[in-house]
Amino acid sequence: MPQIAAFLVLDAFVALIGQPVWAARLDDIRGQAAAGPRAGQAIRQRHAMELAIERLRTATPRPLVPAERLLHDMVAETVRQSRILGPSGQMRLAGALRAAMTGSATLIPLLHLMRTAAMQRSRGFDVSFPGLEHGASFDLLLRRDQVEAEVVCDVVSAEEGRGVHRGAWFRLADRVDPDLQTWLAAHPGRYLLKMTLPGGLREETSLAALHSRIQALLRTRSRQDHDEAIVLRLDPLLLAGAQSDETGLVSSLRREFGPEAHLSVTTAGGGVFVMAARAAQENGIAGAIRKRLADIAPARLTGTRPGILAMFVEDTDRVEWRGLRERLELEGETRQFMTGAAAKGVVAVTFASRIELFGSREADAAPDGELRYRNPGHPAARISALAPAVLSSV
């Protein structure tokens, strides 16, 4: 596709949403991103698709880099479907686009749907959209050599398996930062505030309560504060081999406290104040995903055809995503799900994250654009026509 046409596709996509709605959404995202440096960065990452689309459509036409090309292709598939679908399908697509423009929603569910359809088409399947066209409980229908399979596209947040939500942690760090800078000005040095949060950190109420406890700890110059919901301990920062710059310090802290710790660094003059927090229990991201699988399989698959659950794991980073795979947590929970009654109609489960969405070829990305786990107990598991969509990738 010529480059000028590529940029016109982006305009056509925005036209589907409506220019006023799109402009208002971008203003909302920018407003949220101004709330604080840490939370703002998280907001920009969460809404990276919307911001990238706007950046591309308002820029001088130029060759697209690979990640931009993949985003363009998903957008183009959406525009194409808007012209192929009947009136009911067009209304449902418009509704999905409007829903993506509200609250904490993003374009990810719709882009995941379009990417999944394009990926299966590239594997030799005829792909239709009964979810949009007819309001079916499943999203896609695959056909190949007279064999059909239903596909449910779903998004599950890694936050569902965390006791301490990253979003809440970023908001807390931004709120506490001015207090810590003031405190460092009066108490120069290097400090470490370790937090164990048996009650977790999710809602604004728990965030406000923890902020108040930290303020009281600083005000009274206490070394510790604890109850059944919060354990705080303030100590000098003594970290062997820690580098002086923030990036090096965070790397050293990550090695010290592990991948599940939530970290924040505040500096003022020559002073450094580190906060490190953990939930009382290990994260249960894979377990939360298994629960999601068990919830959606019987609700969204009809049971009349083999079913594929195409899951997009949101709100995870490269290290966490790689760990879920290398420690076999994702595979283990998926295999366990397949032994239960809820998986009776499921021939395979697939997983992707934002790393696969943009076609990363690094070791962090799953091969072939997704992880696949075939259900050996399903009667259709060994049908050759379905193999490209269901054959296990590990």
Image: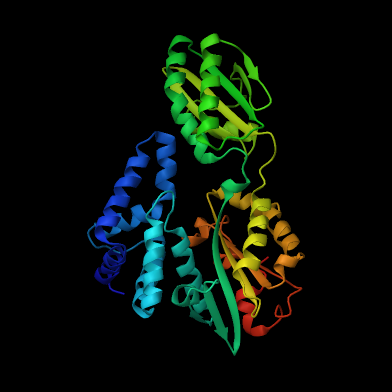
57 on left or right of 169:
left
* Picture residue at 64% right of the left edge, 49% below the top: 285
Nearest the eye: 89 or 238: 89
**Farthest residue in the bottom direction?**
146
The C terminus appears in which quarter of the rendering? bottom right
In x, y percent, where is residue 169? 52, 35
Which percent across, then down, holds residue 304? 65, 80
Quadrant of the image occupied by residue 80? bottom left
* Observer-nearest of 19 and 380: 19
Instruction: Give the left or right position of residue 256, taking residue 207 as reference.
Output: right
* Total number of numbered discs in the rendering: 0
The image quadrant that residue 143 belongs to is bottom right
Image location of residue 10, percent across then percent down:
30, 65
Q: How has the structure been colored for display?
A: rainbow
Is residue 361 shown to the viewer in this render?
no
Q: Is residue 266 above or below residue 315?
A: above
Q: Is residue 386 visible?
A: yes
Query: Toward the viewer: 367 or 163?
Result: 163
In the picture provided, is 72 more to the left or to the right than 271? left
Q: Quadrant of the N terminus?
A: bottom left
Q: Nearer the viewer, residue 336 or 368?
A: 336
| Point 43% across, 47% down: residue | 45
Q: Position of residue 189 (x, y in %)?
A: 51, 14
Residue at 33% in and 41% down: 31
